[in-house]
Image (tube, rainbow, N blue to C red):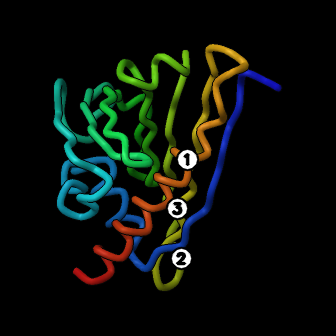
Amino acid sequence: MSLIGTLEADVDIAASAQQFFGVMCNAPNQLTTIVPDIVKSCDLLDGLWGALGAITSWTYVLGGVTTTITLVIGAVNPITKSVTYGLIEGDLKSQFSTFAVQMDATQKIGGCTVHLAITYVKLTQDVSNPQALLDLGVQVIKGLGAYLAQA
């Protein structure tokens, strides 16, 4: 069993790639009202929303457990509608030395496809693959897509 891995999912939503990218990159704090059962808080700690190097603190619920993490925007591309968040501190640091979440939104007729990729390095073989976190990310994307499609 490898310590290094990537989990991926493609999610089709009715919202445009620009709408999705607009929230996930520039206004992720809106997720607290869009998917409040999952995202409890998202606060900007340093930098500007959506800017490379911006640091945000997230509190979310996974399997009934509330978790807090601090993420930094490691890559952002408004042309390709792509944003990558990297873990810098929080509860996941006890399991992963590296943890990054990349989202790419590709426009299509009647919405977009969001490619979600989680790249990680586990600290030990005993750490499970973060499938539950990928599934949670898919739930957030679907919830955001439904919200934006109604707006």
Residue name at image x 33 percent, y 29 percent: 69
Counting other residues with Cα less than 10 Å from the Cα at mark 3, is it few (<14), some (14-19), or many (20 or more)?
Answer: many
Spatial CA distance of label 1 from label 2 is: 28 Å
Say which residue label 3 marks: 114
Say which residue label 2 marks: 108
- Tell me the kind of residue under disc 3: Val
- Tell me the kind of residue under disc 1: Ala
Residue name at image x 55 percent, y 66 percent: 11
Image depth: mark 1 or mark 2 in front:
1
Determine the residue located farthest toward the right in the rendered image: 1
Residue name at image x 61 percent, y 45 percent: 131
Counting other residues with Cα less than 10 Å from the Cα at mark 1, is it few (<14), some (14-19), or many (20 or more)?
Answer: few
Q: Is residue 19 above or below residue 81?
A: below
Counting other residues with Cα less than 10 Å from the Cα at mark 2, is it few (<14), some (14-19), or many (20 or more)?
Answer: some
Disc assigned to residue 132: 1
Asked if disc 1 and disc 2 are in contact, CB closer than 8 Å, the reply is no
The picture places residue 83, in percent across and down from the top left corner, at: 43, 43
